[in-house]
Amino acid sequence: MGEPIIEPIDLSRSQVFRIADLPMHKNPNGSESWNVVHGRLPTGEQISLHVSMQPAGTVPNPAHRIEHSEIICLREGALEFQHDGVTERAAAGDVLFVSKGTMHGVRNVGPGPAAYFVLAIGGDVNQQTK
């Protein structure tokens, strides 16, 4: 089962998105995610933002290649970031950048949950909308 398809939202006005009000998606590997924003900014960029949480010991999703750019902000825990044959560690407060075309994956390497925000920009981000 893949990520749920979400409708684009109106991004022409400022607003608060409350995670507590959003539906949580339970992934087959035990991780959880919340789709927050999906649409086009008034300046033309396509964006998507989701929040993810991987419990300790979670089997990570397989590495994958993206056709957009991503900024991953690690809020809690520790991640191993694999990208195009390089492995780096990230701790709470660190920011990961994934450029278009990069084969990558993240894995929780800490004793507790790893919680992070993923902001996808441009490219193919609107292909998952209805």
Image (tube, grey):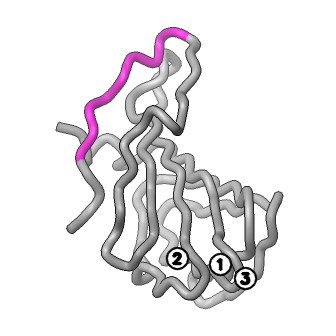
Mark 2 touches mark 1? (CB < 8 Å) = yes
* In the image, farthest residue toward the top: 13
Q: Name which residue type carries label 3.
A: Gly
* 8 inside magenta stretch: yes
Q: Is residue 51 left or right of residue 2?
A: right
Mark before the other along the chain sequence, 2 or 1: 1
Q: Amino acid at mark 1?
A: Phe
CA separation, marks 1 and 3?
A: 13 Å
* Residue identifier under label 2: 104
What residue is at 35 percent from the left and 55 percent from the top? 25
Nearer to us of marks 2 and 3 is 3
The residue nearer to you, when weighing 38 against 30, is: 30
Stretch in magenta = 5-13
Farthest-out residue, front: 20
State how far apart marks 2 and 1 are (Cα). 7 Å
Residue 110 is tagged as 3
Mark closest to the chain's N terminus, 2 or 3? 2
Query: Which residue is nearer to you in this view: 121 or 108?
Result: 108
Residue depicted at x 44% and y 48%: 34
Instruction: Measure the alpha-carbon separation of dots 2 and 3.
Output: 19 Å
The residue pinned by badge 1 equals 81
Q: Where is residue 18 drawn, in percent x and y?
A: 54, 30
